[in-house]
Amino acid sequence: MLPAILPLFPLPQVVLFPQTFLPVRIFEPRYQEMTVEVLNAHHHLILTLMRETPDPGSLGETAPIFETGCLAEVVRAEPLTSGRWNLLLQGKETVRILEELPGKPFRQCRFEAIPFNASVLWPGPHRRHLMESLHAYAAAEGIETQLKELLDLPLEDTGRLNTLAMALDFEPTERQFLLESEDLPTLADRMLQLLDFAVGGRAIRGL
């Protein structure tokens, strides 16, 4: 069982989704300390998106964050020189950050899991509409081959949509919008909105 308090790793441009992977490089001393603690114990931390990019020279110690983040497990750790690390994180589940707690050089928090209902039926017409929008988006961006490779991965629906959310060129706040979905149809509908908006905006710019 995980402890009630876990390290909090806020990033300015990154959103992690359950069932997906994220490589990160650890170089700040406080996060080097966080990494050693995590690797010596439970191998878990919480990754969350900063609401704004920290000022130059700031490490984001007090940067405001979104309350919804992703519990992540360190599945690979490669030590580098000067205490730095290359980590591979795997998203496990969406969580809500309840409160931050002082006491360590890095940020830490209490949290609770946010249930995601993957059993809610995803109607066939909605599925077809999303696939059509995905292919339209891929054609507009010139990534048809990459999309086919993603769609061919042996994943369940939720894992496939989460992988698409990580791979496609969405803004960080758009990914946050997807992460906060409470069930599969909501996730699909929100992705459809973003795809149609992106394709429509590209068409307008091309006039």
Image (cartoon, rainbow, N blue to C red):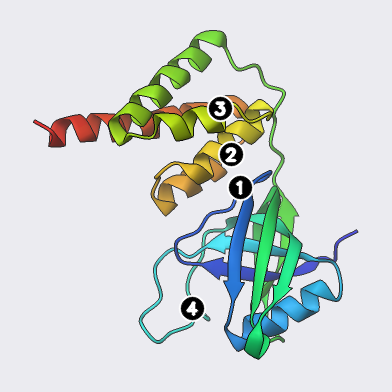
Q: How far apart are marks 1 and 2 (CA)?
A: 6 Å
Estimate the spatial distance between the alpha carbons at disc 3 and disc 2, rounded to whole Å. 12 Å
Give the secondary structure at mark 1.
loop
The residue indicated by pointer 2 is 162
Q: Horizontal and vertical percent for residue 40?
A: 85, 76
State the mark number for residue 151. 3
Residue to which mark 1 is pinned: 17
Of labels 1 and 3, the one closer to you: 3
Q: Do the residues labelled 1 and 2 touch (CB within 8 Å)?
A: yes
Mark 3 or mark 4: which comes first in sequence? 4
Element carrying mark 3: helix
Q: What residue type is labelled 4?
A: Gly
Q: Of callouts 4 and 1, which one flags the residue occurring earlier in the amino acid sequence?
A: 1
CA separation in Å, label 4 and label 1: 22 Å
Viewer-nearest of discs 3 and 4? 3
Answer with mark 1 or mark 2, whichever residue precedes in sequence. 1
The x and y percentages for residue 193 are 39, 30
Query: Looking at the picture, how far across and down is residue 48, in whole percent?
Result: 57, 61
Residue 47 makes an appearance in the image: yes
Q: Do the residues labelled 4 and 2 touch (CB within 8 Å)?
A: no
Query: Which residue matches tag 4?
Result: 60
Asked if residue 5 is positioned above or below residue 193 in the image, the reply reads: below
| Point 39% across, 70% down: residue | 53
Q: In this view, does 199 lie above or below 96?
A: above
Which of the two residues, 18 or 141, is positioned nearer the viewer here?
141
